Image (cartoon, rainbow, N blue to C red):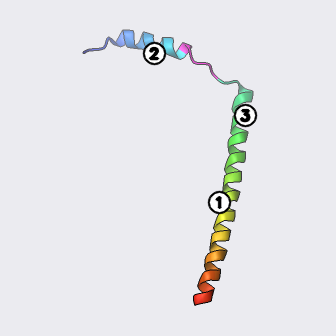
C-alpha cells in the first residue's frame, strides 16, 4: 500500500500541532530533579559498594 507523501506531511503537521511543549521553568525544574536523583543514586551505590567491599574483605581476612 503506497502512502501519499503530501497526506503524510499534512498528518504529521497536524499531530505535531497537538503536542504540548513544556515551559522553560518546567524544563529547568525537571533537569534539576534528574541531577539530584542521579547524585542520590551515585551516593547510594557507593555506600552499597563500600559495605560489600568491607564485608568481603572481612570474610577473606578470616580465611586468608
Q: Are marks 3 and 2 in contact (CB under 8 Å)?
A: no
Q: Which numbered marker is on residue 12?
A: 2
* Residue designated by label 1: 45
Quadrant for the N terminus in the image? top left
Work out how far the residue at label 3 is from the one at label 2, CA to CA, in angstroms.
28 Å
Mark 3 and mark 1: Cα distance apart in space: 26 Å
Pointer 3 residue: 28
| Residue at (71% x, 29% y) in the render | 26
Quadrant that contains the C terminus = bottom right
Choose mark 1 or mark 2, whichever is in front: 1
Q: Which residues are magenta?
A: 17-21
| Residue located at (62% from left, 19% from top) | 20
Q: Are marks 3 and 1 in contact (CB under 8 Å)?
A: no
Location of residue 23 in the rendering, given as x and y in whole percent from the top left corner? 70, 24
Mark closest to the chain's N terminus, 3 or 1: 3
Q: Please, what secondary structure does the residue beneath circle 1 have?
A: helix
Let me know if residue 20 is in the magenta part.
yes
Amino acid at each position: 500500500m503506497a502512502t501519499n507523501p503530501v497526506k503524510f506531511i499534512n498528518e504529521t503537521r497536524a499531530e505535531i500541532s497537538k503536542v504540548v511543549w513544556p515551559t522553560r521553568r518546567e524544563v529547568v525544574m525537571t533537569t534539576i530533579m534528574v541531577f539530584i536523583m542521579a547524585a542520590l543514586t551515585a551516593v547510594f551505590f557507593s555506600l552499597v559498594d563500600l559495605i560489600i567491599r568491607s564485608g568481603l574483605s572481612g570474610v577473606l581476612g578470616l580465611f586468608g
